[in-house]
Image: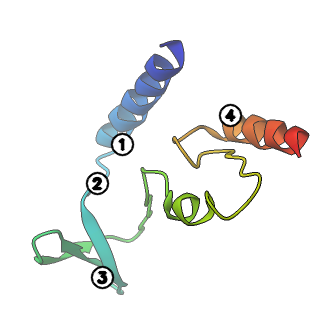
Amino acid sequence: MFHTLNKYKERQSLLARLIDKEVITRTGVRGEEITERGVIVNHRKGVRQTIEAATIVIAAGSRPETTLLGLLKDKVGLLILAGGCLELLNIMSAMVGGYNAGLQV
């Protein structure tokens, strides 16, 4: 419970700072092209939009990618999951998970 609550507080703090700095954020869009004016994105419903900006930060992926897990689970003798492959973690937790996985080999 503490771990989840702590991640929630960290996220809320970051979002508050982004709002305070008037950072434009978009979720559910796919970046298509970076131009001299900014970035062209495509919304889920197919609507293209140009977001004018001098600086663009792409923070993609807030869900673990588990496709490879599904492909490998019945094909290998030992499959150790480490880092953020099942849930998103901060870097320290991911490093500890990788270290612990290495100890199992």
Contact between marks 2 and 1 (CB within 8 A): the answer is yes
Q: CA distance from mark 3 to mark 1?
A: 21 Å
Which of the two marks, 4 or 2, is nearer to us in this view? Answer: 4
Q: Which residue is mark 3?
A: 37
- The tally of labels here is 4
Q: Name the quadrant containing residue 73.
A: bottom right
User: Of the residues under marks 3 and 1, which one precedes in the sequence?
Assistant: 1
Q: CA distance from mark 2 to mark 1?
A: 8 Å
Secondary element type, mark 1: helix
The one nearer the camera, 28 or 10, is 28
- At x 72%, y 61%, the residue is 76
Q: Name the quadrant containing residue 14.
A: top left
Secondary element type, mark 2: loop
User: Of the residues under marks 4 and 1, which one precedes in the sequence?
Assistant: 1
Q: CA distance from mark 4 to mark 2?
A: 26 Å
Which of the two marks, 2 or 1, is nearer to us in this view? Answer: 2
